[in-house]
Amino acid sequence: MSALIPYIDEPHPVTGVTNAKLGMWLFLASEVMLFGALFSTLIIMRTSATDWPAHGSDVLNVPLATLNTVFLITSSVTIVLSWAALKMKDLKKFKFNMGLTILLSFGFLVIKYIEYTSKFHHGHFPSTSTFYAVYFTLTGLHGLHVIGGIITNLYLIGPGSKMWEKEPERFTGRIECAGLYWHFVDLVWIFLFPALYLL
Amino acid sequence: MGHGEMTVEEVKKHVRKYYVVFSALLGLTIVTVAISYLHLPIFQAVLLAMAVASMKGGLVAAYFMHLMDEKKIIYSLLWLTVILFGFCMLIPLFTLHGPQTTY
C-alpha cells in the first residue's frame, strides 16, 4: 500500500515552502550540528595538543587544497546554473551544467586521493598524531559527503531526469534540494580549508 | 528559493548575480591564502581567516542557497540552528577549567 506525500511540488499553505525543501533544510540543520561538534573538537584538540604543527601548511599541501577550493566553488556555481536552466525550461543546458558539477566533484576526489596517498606513503595515518586524527576525520567525513552528492547528482542527470517530461516542477524541486545539499558541502569546505591547512 | 514562478528575464538576472558572487568567492579565496603567508600571531590569524571564511559562507548561503529571499519558517529553523551551533562552539571554554589534559 502506498500513499502520496503531499506538497512535494507545490508550497504547503502553512509553511509557504514545499515539504521536500523543508525536509532538506531540516536535514542540513542536523548536518550543521554534526560538523559543529567536530569543529568544537578541533578547537579543544588544537588548544591542548602537545604535538600540533605551527601552521597546517607545514605538513599539508596548500596549493592542492586551494585548487580543491576552486573546484568546489565552481561546482557550486554550475549546480545553481543547472537549476536556473530548468527554470528557463532548457534541459540540455541543465545536463551540461550538472555534468560540469559532477566532473568538478570527481576532480575534488582525485586531488583528495593524491593528498591521502602522499600522506600514507610518508607514514602519516590517523593514529600518527592528534593533528592527523583530526585531519583525516574531518576531511574524510567531508569526502563522504562529496561522494553522496556525486551519487545523487549522477542519478539526477541520468535515470532521474526522466521525471522532467511528466513532472517538470517536481524535478526542478529535486534539483533545488540537491543544490542546497551541494552548497552545504561547499560551505563546510570553506571553513575546513583555513582551519586545517592555513592556521 | 522563494521564487516559484519566475520569468526568463528574472532568471537571467539571477544568473548574472551568480557570476558576480563567483568572482567574489575566487577573490576571497586568494585573500584567505595570502593571509596565511603573513604569519600573524595565532589569535589574529584565526580571527581574520574565520572572518573571510564567514564572508564567503555568507555569499554562498545568501545567493546560491537563496537565503536572501526565503520563507519565514526556514529563517526560524536556521536561527535555532545558529543558536545551538553557538553553544557547540562555546563547549571548548569549559575545558579551560579543571585539571589540564594534553593529547
Image (cartoon, coloured by chain):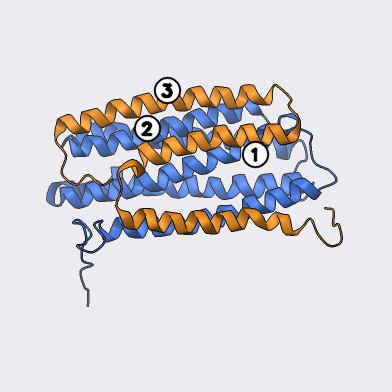
Chain colours: A blue, B orange
Q: Is residue A160 left or right of residue A164?
A: right
Residue A75 image point, x, y percent: 41, 34
Q: Could you tell me the amino acid type at mark 3?
A: Ser
Callout in the foreground (1, 2): 1
Q: Which residue is mark 1?
A: A195
The residue closer to the viewer here, B86 or A30, is B86
Q: Residue at x 63, y 50 (%)?
A: A39
Residue A123 image point, x, y percent: 78, 40
Callout in the foreground (3, 2): 3
Q: Is residue A145 visible?
A: yes
**Residue A77 numbered mark, or none:** 2
Quadrant that contains the N terminus of chain A: bottom left
Q: Residue at x 75, y 46 (%)?
A: A46
User: From mark 1 to mark 2, how far is it between C-alphas?
Assistant: 23 Å
**Residue B23 numbered mark, or none:** 3
Same subunit under labels 1 and 2? Answer: yes
Q: Could you tell me the amino acid type at mark 1?
A: Ala
Quadrant that contains the C terminus of chain A: top right
Query: In the displayed structure, would residue A57 be above or below residue A120?
Result: above
User: From mark 3 to mark 2, how far is it between C-alphas?
Assistant: 10 Å
The residue closer to the viewer here, A80 or A12, is A12
Q: Residue at x 28, y 36 (%)?
A: A82
Q: Secondary structure at mark 2?
A: helix
Query: In the displayed structure, would residue A80 be above or below residue B31?
Result: below
| Residue B41, image quadrant | top right
Q: Is residue A158 left or right of residue A111?
A: left
Query: In the displayed structure, would residue B88 be above or below residue B25?
Result: below
